Image (spheres, rainbow, N blue to C red):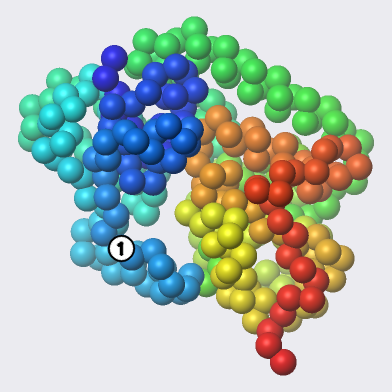
Amino acid sequence: MRVVSLLPSATETVCALGVDPVGVTHECDYPPRVESIPTVVHSTIDTDGSSREVDDRVQRSIERGGVYTLDRERLRGLDPDVIVSQGLCDVCAVDEAVVRGTIADLGLDAELVATHPHSLDDVLDDVERIGRAIDREPAARRLVADLRDRIDRVREHVDGTATPTVTVLDWLDPVMISGHWMPELVEIAGGEFRLAEPGERSGPIEWATLREADPDVLVAAPCGFSLDRTSESLSDLTAREGWSELRAVREGRAYVMDGNHYVNRPGPRLVDTLEHLAALLHPERFDEPPAEVVRPIPRATGPPS
């Protein structure tokens, strides 16, 4: 079975089901062995610079036709049986319509599996859909059953606990709130998500709105940013008026999380994310999250004097 994955979460899912893709994207990096697989998707933007600069480049690229380019000739040469893409977000992967058009133009005999997840159930359903498409149905059922067992264990551990208010940020400048599956994950982890409902798209908010919400726990997890990259960009938040007055900052419950791997990829590791969130919200009931995934924001961090 020759599979081409056009987004990192699909690559993770396909590999978890026992099939290594023959083609991936420039962003696919987990499991680590996929970094040596031929790349069929490339970015059109420079991702260096501040959050504001990257966002500006993304918006300009969308206006010009897209953030990504598809290597048509390499895709033709790989001759896939299945291509996994998505229709959720033009900033996250090649547009689904572009992929369908390319399959038709190249005359590929390939099945397109396009995912559109907005909830945790959607993500688990996609694991099973992908499993059917790549002839790994039993493996998909076993994986989903294991993931659901872990989700249920988190629910059991937080039962009867206090419910802190939580906000997870999808971008720093402009400030954006994480939507889709993140409000649901926070609720399962024993928290009350502020400023978005489960299934809503991620979107921008005014800084004043976040200050007014004043959550007990704040997690900065920008889309596509590693833990170190987010830490380096913290002044986009901490230099804002009223940062040090936020309850989460005053009480030492503001964190950075590896958004690239654990927040923005709707694949099997979202259940890891759930467990890490539960540990932040209820440290008395869970082991501390790994230092390579979550890092506290120092209370003293703030605007320059």
Inspect this view and state whether residue 304 appears: yes
Give the vertical position of 210 relative to 149 (above or below). below
Residue 209 or residue 8, whichever sits in front: 8
Q: Is residue 262 above or below residue 301?
A: above
Which quadrant would the N terminus be assigned to in this image?
Answer: top left
Task: Decide: is 94 above or below 119.
Answer: below
Q: Quadrant of residue 59?
A: bottom left
- Percent coordinates x, y for residue 304 in the rendering: 68, 88
Q: Count all numbered tags in the image, as a single digit.
A: 1
Residue at numbered disc 1: 45
Write the residue at 79% across / 48% down. 280
Q: Amino acid at mark 1?
A: Ile
Name the residue rendered at 73%, 65% in the picture. Answer: 297
**At which x and y percent is residue 166?**
74, 55
Residue 232 shown left or right of residue 291 in the figure: left
Element type at marker 1?
loop
Residue nearest the observer in this picture, 5 or 166: 5
Quarter where residue 251 is shown:
bottom right
Q: Is residue 290 left or right of residue 160?
A: left
Residue 111 picture quarter = top left
Please state, as top left, top right, bottom left or bottom right, where the C terminus lies in the image.
Answer: bottom right
Residue 83's x, y, as percent? 28, 28
Q: Residues within 10 Å of mark 1 (few under 14, many from 20)?
A: some
